[in-house]
Amino acid sequence: MTTTVTPAPRVTVMSVKLSKECAEDILTTAIESAAIQYWTCDESGIPISIRRDRESGNVVTANFVAENEAGETVPCFVDWNVIQAGVNVLMAPGFDIDPRILHSIIDDDVDQLAADCIIQAALFGALLYS
């Protein structure tokens, strides 16, 4: 993981580039800790479908359905690129999030709460569920 901080007038823009393995670790944390199950529609009988890497055992993709901001049930796909996109959203100037979440990403110590936030940010551009 590479972390870059670029100072600008009144704004600090942060960029965190995740390795594929680190992003897959985050997705694995989200799935194995059930961090996202409270807002996915798995209780409707549609389970989360995952694919794991044979060597590492990490979750590399997840497919599920969830309600978006409009209340529509939409299909969701998450892989390491989606995880990176979620980190980018969370790190954007003006995104309102607990600084502890950002520090956990920067410190490569993502827990289930941070993993949940990353995936919501990637899929919805906001934290719809808490």
Image (cartoon, helix red, strand yellow):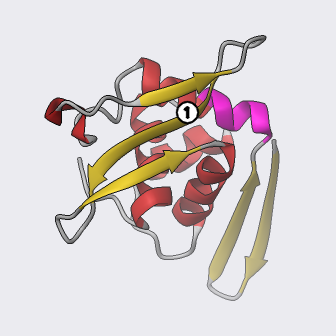
Q: Name the residue tied to disc 1.
A: 27
Q: Is residue 100 left or right of residue 107?
A: left
Dot 1: what SS?
helix
The prevailing secondary structure element of the residues shown in magenta is helix
Image quadrant where residue 89 sits: bottom right
Q: Amino acid at mark 1?
A: Leu
Return the residue nearer the eye: 93 or 122: 122
Residue 40 is situated, as x and y percent measured from the top left of the image, at 28, 41
Q: Position of residue 56 (x, y in %)?
A: 74, 13
Left/right of residue 93 with respect to residue 112 in the rendered view: right
The residue sitting at 69% across, 88% down in the picture is 9
Local crowd size for mark 1, using a 10 Å CA cut-off: few (<14), some (14–19), many (≥20): many
Residue 109 makes an appearance in the image: no
Q: Is residue 121 visible?
A: yes
For residue 22: magenta? Answer: yes
**Which sits in the foreground, 61 or 25?**
61
Q: Residue at x 17, y 64 (%)?
A: 71
Q: Quarter of the image for the N terminus: give it.
A: top right
Residue 109: x, y in percent?
Answer: 60, 29
Q: Residue at x 22, y 35 (%)?
A: 38
- Vertical comparison of 95 with 40: above or below: below
> Which span of residues is magenta-colored?
19-25
Residue furthest front in the image: 45
Relative depth, front residue between 49 and 69: 49
- Residue 35 in the magenta stretch? The answer is no
